Image (cartoon, grey):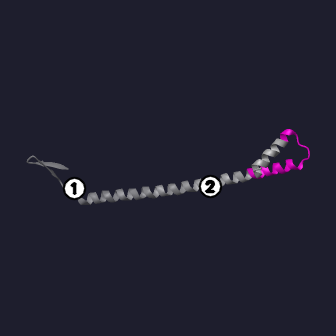
Amino acid sequence: MLAQWGGMQLKKKGKKKSKGAASESVNEEWNEFKQYKEKELELSDKIAMRQEEANQLLKESTEVKKMKMFMKLSSKEHLDDRRKELLEKLGRDLFGN
């Protein structure tokens, strides 16, 4: 707060207790905010990890289905053109040939 005395501006000293209390309150709020953000980050990491696990399981499941289809098609002696093409595609997907 400013006051005037003889054309000069003077600063009035505020109560130190109120500044200290306000500063302490701000520090507490900042610490709470940091803790909240840390928890939020941990939860985001857990969600990302679970999504990766789910994607991996889905990929493995798809590979198993492809393998079953490949084995079923390869066990047959006579395949039409569409099935031959599918068998070749599955072979490339599974074995990289």
The answer to whether residue 10 is left or right of residue 45 is: left
Image quadrant in which you'd find residue 87: top right
Give amino acid for label 1. Answer: Gly
Q: Which residues are magenta?
A: 62-83
The residue lying toward the viewer, choosing from 16 and 84, is 84
Q: Percent position (x, y) of residue 50?
A: 62, 55
> Looking at the image, which residue is at 24% across and 60% down?
16
Extreme residue toward the right, this view: 77
Residue drawn 45% across the image and 58% down it = 35
Residue 8 drawn in magenta: no
> Which label number is shown at residue 14?
1
Residue depicted at 19% across the width and 56% down the height: 13
Q: Outermost residue, top direction?
A: 81
10 Å crowding of disc 1: few (<14), some (14-19), many (20+): few
Label total for image: 2
Q: Give coordinates of residue 22: x percent, y percent.
A: 31, 56
Please tell me whether mark 1 sits on a helix, a strand or a loop.
Answer: loop
Q: Position of residue 69 (x, y in %)?
A: 82, 48
Instruction: Please give the residue where the numbered disc 2 appears in the rendered image.
Output: 50
Residue 70: which numbered mark, if any? none
* Overall secondary structure of the magenta section: helix
Residue at the far front in the pictured view: 97
